[in-house]
Amino acid sequence: MTTDTGRTEGDSWDLASSVGATATMVAASRAVASQGPNPLLDDPFADPLVRAVGLAPFVRILDGEVDFDDDPLLNRKTRTEQMAVRTRFFDDFFVGATKDGVRQAVILASGLDTRAYRLQWPAGTVVYEIDQPQVIEFKTNTLADLGAAPTAERRTVAIDLREDWPAALRESGFDTTQPTAWSAEGLLPYLPPEAQDRLFDNIASLSAPGSRLATEHVPDPNAFTEDRLQRISERWRRAGFNLDAADLFYQGDRSVVVDYLTDHGWQVTAHPVRELYARNGFEFPEDEMAATFGEMSYVAAVLK
C-alpha cells in the first residue's frame, strides 16, 4: 500500500514542472560536470537544454551565480563527482553492450538524456527513447534547433510509462527477437511499488535472451521515509528548487531490485556506489544524507 503523494493518476508534466523538473536538475548537474578545463563529463548538449527549459535556479547554477561551498552535499565538487559516477556507469553500460553486439537500446523516461546524440553508437544501432509527449517534443525540437544530429537511429516513443508503452514501442519498430540494452536511470522512486514490478515484467517480456538492463538498487525498499524526503526537499529549496520530494516520490513497501530481477531470470551484478566512487578516483562524501544512500548500488543485469 502506498502513502499519499502530490501525484495523481494520469498526471503529466513538462521539463519545468513536477517530475520533469527533476530531469532538468539532473541535466544541470551534467552540464556543470562538463564545464572547465578538466571536465569530468563531456555532454555538450546539457547546458543548452537546461537554458532552453529556462528554470532560473538551474541557469544560475550553470553560470556559477549560486555558491554551495559550505554544503557537503551541494557543493560543486560533490555534485559533479556524484553525477560523473552515475553518468559514466550508464554510458559504460551501453558502450559495453554494443561491443558485445547489441544493436537495440531503450532509454526509459529519457528526459534530457543525450546519449542518442553523444555516444559513438555502432552503425545499425537503433536507440528508442520513451517519455511523456511534451518532454520528447521539447528535447527533439531544441536539439534540432541547435543543429545536433543523433549518432544512432533515434526513434521516439511519446507515451507515459503508466500507459501501454510496450505496444507503442513495438509499433515503433522494436524487434523482440533481438537482444536489447535497457536503462531505467533515476526512475524507480517516481513509480508506485506495483508499477516498478510491472515495469520489470514488461521489460522481461519484450527482451530476447542476452538482453541487458541497467538501473539502481537500494537494499532498503523503504529508504525514502518522510523524514528523508523532507531533508531532500530542504536541500532542493536551498538550491532554489521549490518542489517537495514527498509530492514526487512514491513511498510504501516495494520489491528489492536485485532480488526481483534475480527471481525473474536475470543474472544480476550489483556495483556498490562506494566502490564506483573509488574506481573513479573519488572519495564518497561524508554527509549524513549521502551516507543514507551509501549502500546503494548501480545494477547491470543480463537476461538468461
Image (spheres, rainbow, N blue to C red):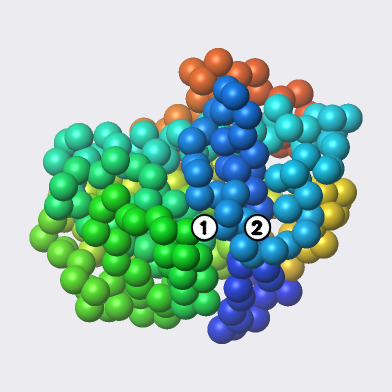
**Could you say which is closer to the camera, residue 80 or residue 109?**
80
Residue 3, given in percent of the width and then of the height, sits at 70, 69
SS state under label 1: loop
265 left or right of 176 in image:
right
Q: Earlier in the sequence, mark 1 or mark 2?
A: 2
Q: Residue at x 27, y 34 (%)?
A: 96
Of the residues shown, which amino acid type is indicated by label 1? Leu
Q: Residue at x 49, y 18 (%)?
A: 279
Circle 2: is it few (<14), some (14-19), or many (20+) Cα within 10 Å?
Answer: some
- Residue 244 location in percent, x, y? 79, 63
Q: Which residue is mark 2?
A: 51
- Answer whether residue 304 is visible to the viewer in this image: no
Q: Amino acid at mark 2?
A: Arg
Q: Quadrant of the C terminus?
A: top left
Which of discs 1 and 2 lies nearer the camera? The answer is 2
Percent position of residue 222, x then y: 65, 51
Q: Residues within 10 Å of mark 1 (few under 14, many from 20)?
A: many
**Residue 38 seen by the camera:** yes
- Residue labelled with disc 1: 112
